[in-house]
Amino acid sequence: MTSTPRVRRAYVDLAHGQMHYAECGDRADTATPVVLLHQTPRSWREYAEVLPLLGVHHRTIAIDTAGFGESDPVAAPGIEAWAEAALRMLDAIGVGRAHVVGHHTGGVIGVEMAARAPERVASLVLSSTPYTNEAFRHARAGRPAIDAVAPSDDGSHLAALWQKRQPFYPQGRPELLQAFVADALKTSGDVEAGHRAVASYRMEERIAAPRMPVLILHASDDPFAAPHLAEWRRLLPAAQVATIAGGVPLPDQCPHEFAAAVLAFLEALPR
């Protein structure tokens, strides 16, 4: 019986500050490692249960995006800067090439990593990732903020943050919302910054014909991302698609199904 690998956590020093990450698996493994990028305003803990499931088979690294979790912020936050910081962090730990898995904002960061350094991205898993073209930007500009709440002396803004997210989380799983709120409170600066960065990203200029294999991981109950599946099928007709019955917190809501879908995709890649 294979034992569950231990999760290790560490920091690296970069030009903008420190980046924090957690990893699982054998560092001496010469195979291409897996990199996990979280949604905002979460942290590596979104993958806390996925990490050891993947780590049994691959060295797996979950990064705290710059300005989230325990990672220091960059001077000018945005998808491009966060992707560059992730690449520099991988440089610092000696990872030249990786399979990149991104959920929501993490998927958008993964697209930018693949666009600016395609030789560094062996494959790309886009989990609940929106396609952020002009139509998306126009629609998002007319909608209210997703997580923004005004601070209050009595702490009622914490309940407001919980209530804003509650409709998108499964009933009977308060621990998922608690983890979300805990991560949101650690965000450097505005908790809404990640959503604004996604809403302004010009993906249509960056997504053209990825050279690497792509898996679209589709959460059937995700109201933000599920409608984008048809667009992804049109844009990336060669991409594989896997559907999981889950919602916005897919990696922590369905860790076994999530890990199984990623592993099946990786195992089918050409050696």
Image (cartoon, rainbow, N blue to C red):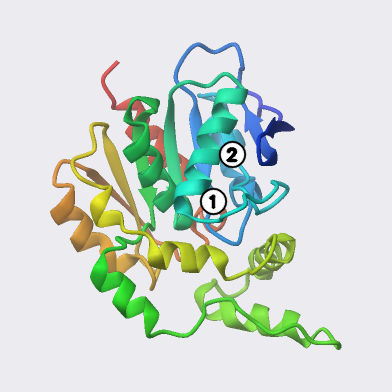
In-front residue for pair 24/259: 24
Counting from the top left corner in percent of width and height, residue 264 is at 35, 34
Q: Residue furthest right?
A: 154
Q: Is 248 displayed left or right of 75 in the figure?
A: left
Left or right of residue 246, residue 233 in this image: left
Q: Residue at x 49, y 24 (%)?
A: 33
x and y, in percent, of residue 39 in the image:
52, 57
Taking depth in this image into account, of 26 and 112 the one nearest to the observer is: 112
User: Disc 1 marks which amino acid?
Assistant: His
Position above or below: 139 against 78: below
Q: Quadrant of the N terminus?
A: top right
Is 9 rendered above or below residue 109? above
Amino acid at pointer 2: Ala
Residue at the image position 18 percent from the left and 40 percent from the top: 209
Secondary structure of the residue carrying tag 2 is strand
* Residue 256 in view (yes/no): no
Residue 139 at least partly seen: yes
How packed mark 2 is, by other alpha carbons closer than 10 Å (few <14, some 14-19, many 20 or more), is many
Could you give the CA–CA distance between mark 2 and mark 1, rounded to whole angstroms? 8 Å
Q: Which mark is residue 38?
A: 1
Among the 4 quarters of the image, the one containing residue 139: bottom left
Q: Compare residues 24 and 76 and report the one nearer the observer.
A: 76
Q: Position of residue 224 (x, y in %)?
A: 39, 70
Task: Determine which quarter of the picture holds residue 189.
Answer: bottom right
Q: Are marks 2 and 1 in contact (CB under 8 Å)?
A: yes
Kindly identify which residue carries mark 2.
62
Identify the image quadrant of the C terminus: top left
Give whichever of discs 2 and 1 has the lower sequence position: 1
Measuring 60% from the left and 52% from the top, which residue is drawn there? 46
Helix, strand or loop at label 1? It is loop
